[in-house]
Image: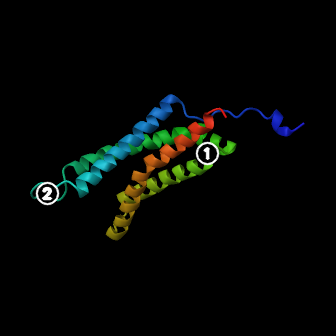
Amino acid sequence: MAEHLHARPRKSVRPGRQQRGMNYLASGLLLGSGALWLVAHYLLPLPEFAARHPLEPWAMRVHGAAVLLAMLVLGSLWTPHLQAAWKQRRHLGTGLVLGGSWLALALSGYGLYYVADEDLRASLSLVHWGWGLALPVLLGLHLVQAQRARRPA
């Protein structure tokens, strides 16, 4: 008899409702605070005699706090979602791109905080906000792929 007929059904690796909610909350806070910083930095007029818009430091404070939440959420997804999906070979394409994007954001964000060279910081900034703006699209693609796979054939 064929071996696949005796295989156990695959266990769901879908994060629970609370994990998904916290992921969306952290991602939304990061996107919102990062977008607010971009708008304040590049689009809003500076108040008279100001070196930067007053919204910029507030946007970065929220962004920094949201990073802590996002790291907690990503850590909570490591074993029950990422490792389990990897073992089952599920949604590897979008999952790897999504994971690589989070890694690029973490490394570029770290660089923005600690790198002193202004030319390198300018490049890191472009990488960081480019991946940050792309992340919701990548997360959406991952979710659509997973949702399609859950539908009965």
Amino acid carrying mark 1 in the image: His
Which of the marked residues, 1 or 2, is nearer the chain's N terminus?
A: 2
Q: Residue at x 9, y 56 (%)?
A: 48
Q: Quadrant of residue 38?
A: bottom left
Q: Nearer the viewer, mark 1 or mark 2?
A: 1
Distance between mark 1 and mark 2 Cα atoms: 48 Å
> Mark 2: few, some, or many residues within 10 Å (few <14, many ≥20)?
few
Q: Position of residue 37 (x, y in %)?
A: 28, 51
Q: Nearer the viewer, residue 55 or 94?
A: 94
Q: Are marks 1 and 2 in contact (CB under 8 Å)?
A: no
- Residue sitting farthest toward the left: 48
Q: Residue at x 64, y 43 (%)?
A: 90
Q: Position of residue 128 (x, y in %)?
A: 40, 57
Q: Residue at x 43, y 38 (%)?
A: 24
Q: Tag 2, which secondary structure?
A: loop
The residue that label 2 is drawn on is 50
- Residue sitting farthest toward the front: 153
Q: Position of residue 10 (x, y in %)?
A: 70, 34
Look at the image and tell me in which quarter the N terminus lies: top right
- Residue sitting farthest toward the top: 17
Amino acid carrying mark 2 in the image: Ala
Q: Residue at x 43, y 52 (%)?
A: 134
In the picture shown, does residue 153 fall above or below 35? above
The residue that label 1 is drawn on is 91
Residue 106 disc label: none
Look at the image and tell me in which quarter the C terminus lies: top right
